[in-house]
Image (cartoon, helix red, strand yellow):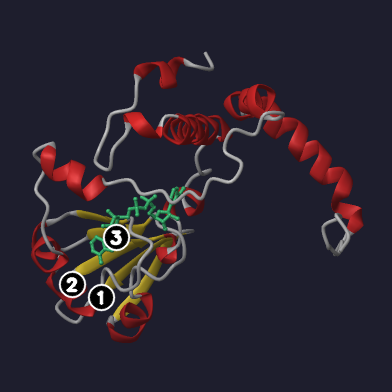
Amino acid sequence: MSDKLNYKVADISLADWGRKAIDIAENEMPGLMKMKEMYGQSKPLKGARIAGCLHMTLQTAMEGYEVTTMDEASKEGNIFVTTTGCEDIIVGHHFESMKDDAIVCNIGHFDCEIDISWLNKNAAEKINIKPQVDRYRMKSGRHIILLAEGRLVNLGCAMGHPSFVMSNSFTNQVLAQIELWKNTDKYPIGVHFLPKKVDLLYK
Ligand SMILES: NC(=O)c1ccc[n+]([C@@H]2O[C@H](COP(=O)([O-])OP(=O)(O)OC[C@H]3O[C@@H](n4cnc5c(N)ncnc54)[C@H](O)[C@@H]3O)[C@@H](O)[C@H]2O)c1
């Protein structure tokens, strides 16, 4: 079998534009470029099979914030941001119990978390306030303000987050993975704080 990857170029005319985008991205992602420089040859994670999970819900409760169900939160909140990546987080009966002019948006990938089709079918009226902001009048007379039609709000209503922030986040994740993979003896199954030197490594 050939060592070359099988691929098909759909539109080679995009190559120049792609190269310019890569030039800018390389400048905006210094952490990742440093990773490439430090580990590109040695490939310390070769062979590792990695699954990631951030325990935000565990952590939120430990920080003293209230963790509750949507059935309860829907009656109390003024702003709702779904962040799970899972389907049907905010559905019809939640909209019906929300306060007047509750703001609803989603930051998880895919627009499956908020049941927009229910809103479109069941609201008495939908008024487009401005691009990416819709105000629905419910049959109860209360309103729901929906941002970015339930799609990723940081991309719909803003410019996303800068590449530099993503570079920091991904770099930290890779450094943590290398630390765990190379020093398995130090990390029995459990929850661990990674050593501070991992944060400082590429500075
Ligand atoms: N918009 C962006 O820029 C951006 C950036 C990063 C991640 N994301 C997306 O955000 C989503 C979450 O990413 P993550 O890395 O935080 O994932 P994660 O798995 O760490 O967090 C998701 C959390 O949602 C909770 N959850 C799942 N289903 C739930 C439910 N039915 N009710 C209540 N809580 C529920 C999980 O317990 C978990 O704590 C993904 O879709 C990801 O692709 C978006």
| In-image side of 96 versus 173 (left or right) | left
Amino acid type of disc 2?
A: His
Q: Residues within 10 Å of mark 2 (few under 14, many from 20)?
A: some
Q: Is residue 119 above or below residue 70?
A: below
Q: What residue do we see at 48% from left, 48% from top?
A: 50
Of all residues, the one furthest to the right in this rendering is: 13
Q: Residues within 10 Å of mark 1 (few under 14, many from 20)?
A: some
Front position among marks 3 and 1: 1
Determine which residue is flagged by label 1: 91
Determine which residue is flagged by label 3: 104
| In-image side of 158 versus 54 (left or right) | right
Locate residue 170, reporting x and y percent. Answer: 51, 36
CB of residue at label 1: within 8 Å of ligand 1? no
Q: What residue do we see at 65% from left, 34% from top?
A: 43
Q: What residue do we see at 53% from left, 43% from top?
A: 159
Helix, strand or loop at disc 1? Answer: loop
The answer to whether the residues at label 1 and label 2 have Cβ atoms under 8 Å apart is yes
Amino acid type of disc 1?
A: Val
Amino acid type of disc 3?
A: Val
In terms of image quadrants, where is residue 184?
A: top left
Locate residue 31, reporting x and y percent. Answer: 57, 25
Among the two numbered marks 3 and 1 on one chain, the one whose residue lies closer to the N terminus: 1
Between 37 and 15, the one nearer to me in the picture: 37
| In-image side of 28 versus 57 (left or right) | right
In terms of image quadrants, where is residue 33?
A: top right
In terms of image quadrants, where is residue 108?
A: bottom left
Helix, strand or loop at disc 2? Answer: helix
Q: Within the displayed image, which quadrant is ligand 1 positioned in?
A: bottom left
Helix, strand or loop at disc 3? Answer: strand
Cα distance in 3D space between marks 1 and 2: 6 Å
Locate residue 5, reporting x and y percent. Answer: 82, 57
